[in-house]
Amino acid sequence: MANESSKASIVVFSGDMDKIFAALIIATGCAAAGMDTTLFFTFWGLNAIKTGEPIQAKSFLGKMMGMLNRGGIHRLNPSRFSFGGIGRMLFSKMMGDKNVASLEELRQTTIDLDVHLLACKMSMDVLEITRDDLIPEVEDVVGVATFVKEAAGSQIQLFI
């Protein structure tokens, strides 16, 4: 069991496949080491915890953003060598060939290890994402002040 000072807090800002992969690997490592671990998903990072279903935005810009940025962990592209989505397939194949867990498996491992998944309320408001657009395992939708308070008591704070 982790003691109170054994905590890790990670901001997940990027929605790039490789950066989400890094955030999930670090989170699972921290949690497996007994640390109370929190992932705070904001802006493009929210794509890793979105269901991937079309969002029901109300404004014209929100609807356009929803179409262009549908999200879902299986749709994430690498930050380099995307090649219009082909890079995602290539990296997934290469990772599978090396018996590396997929992003879906890593996300499930964070859930199984009781990593706290938090979504940024302001980012969700701006992008017109609702709680229903997120996977059910997201613990809460919070403001940055809640996350900052959490991070202030953490031994490890990262921004990915």
Image (cartoon, rainbow, N blue to C red):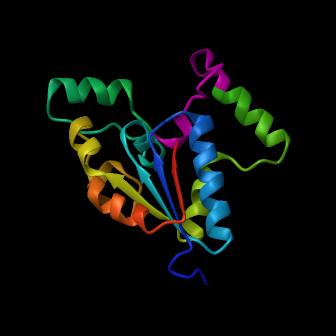
114 in the magenta segment? no
Q: In this picture, is 122 found above or below 36?
A: above
Q: Residue furthest left?
A: 59
Tell which of 152 and 36 is nearer to you: 152
Residue at 59%, 72% in the rendered image: 35
Q: Which span is picked out in magenta?
A: 72-87
Q: Which image quarter: residue 71?
A: top left
Residue 32, picture quadrant: bottom right
Position of residue 119 measured from the top left corner of the image (x, y, whole percent): 35, 53
When the figure is inspected, residue 12 is found, relative to residue 143, above or below; the finding is: above
Residue 117 seen in this snapshot: yes
Give the residue displayed 68% in from the left and 47% down from the top.
102
Front one among 42 and 158: 158
Report whether residue 105 is seen. Answer: no
Q: Residue at x 41, y 55 (%)?
A: 135
- Percent position of residue 145, x then y: 27, 58
Please say whether residue 75 is one of the residues in the magenta stretch. yes
Q: Which residue corresponds to the image point at 72% horizontal and 31% vertical from the top-left?
A: 91
Q: Position of residue 141 (x, y in %)?
A: 29, 58
Q: Going by the image, does 43 lie left or right of 24?
A: left
